[in-house]
Amino acid sequence: MSLMIDVEKCVGCGVCMQVCPAVFKLDDEEGYATVISREYDDKTEGFVKEAIGSCPIGCINI
Ligand code: SF4
C-alpha cells in the first residue's frame, strides 16, 4: 500500500501515531508526522484506515 502524509498540511497533532504507532511517528523537531513502515499485516491495516479517518486535516493519503 502506498501511504503518504502531506507534510505541508499536517499540523502535528499526533492522532495518527496514537491510533497506529506501528506505522506513524510524529517528528517532534519538524512538527509533522512521518510514515515509518509501509509493510504491515491486515490487522494493522485496519488501524491505518482508522488513522486516516481520524486525521483532522485529512492529509494522510493512500
Ligand atoms: S493525524 Fe493528520 S494532522 Fe495529525 S499528525 Fe497525523 S497526519 Fe498530521
Image: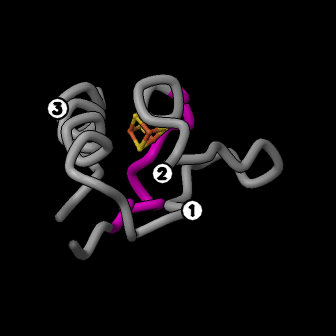
The location of residue 30, given as percent across then percent down, is: 73, 54
Q: Is residue 8 magenta?
A: yes
Q: Which of 26 and 32 lies nearest the eye of the viewer?
A: 26
Question: On the rendered image, what quadrant is the C terminus found in?
Answer: bottom left
Q: Is residue 58 above or below residue 56?
A: below
Image disc number at residue 53: 3
Say whether residue 51 is left or right of residue 25: left
Query: Which residue ends up furthest to the right in the rendered image?
Result: 29
Q: Residue at x 56, y 37 (%)?
A: 12
Quick check: marks 2 and 1 in contact, CB under 8 Å? Answer: yes
Which callout, 1 or 3, points at the residue further toward the start of the chain? 1
Q: Is residue 48 magenta?
A: no
Please tell me how crowded label 2 is: few (under 14), some (14-19), or many (20+) other residues with Cα within 10 Å.
many
Which callout, 2 or 3, points at the residue further toward the start of the chain? 2
Quick check: marks 1 and 3 in contact, CB under 8 Å? Answer: no
Q: Is residue 14 above or below residue 39?
A: above
- Give the residue at mark 2: 23
Q: Secondary structure at mark 2?
A: loop
Q: Secondary structure at mark 3?
A: helix
Q: Secondary structure at mark 1?
A: loop
- Which amino acid is tagged 3? Gly
Q: Is residue 62 above or below residue 57?
A: below
Q: CA distance from mark 1 to mark 3?
A: 18 Å
Which callout, 2 or 1, points at the residue further toward the start of the chain? 2
Question: On the rendered image, what quadrant is the N terminus found in?
Answer: bottom left
- Give the residue at mark 1: 36
> Which range is magenta?
4-14
Q: Residue at x 57, y 62 (%)?
A: 36
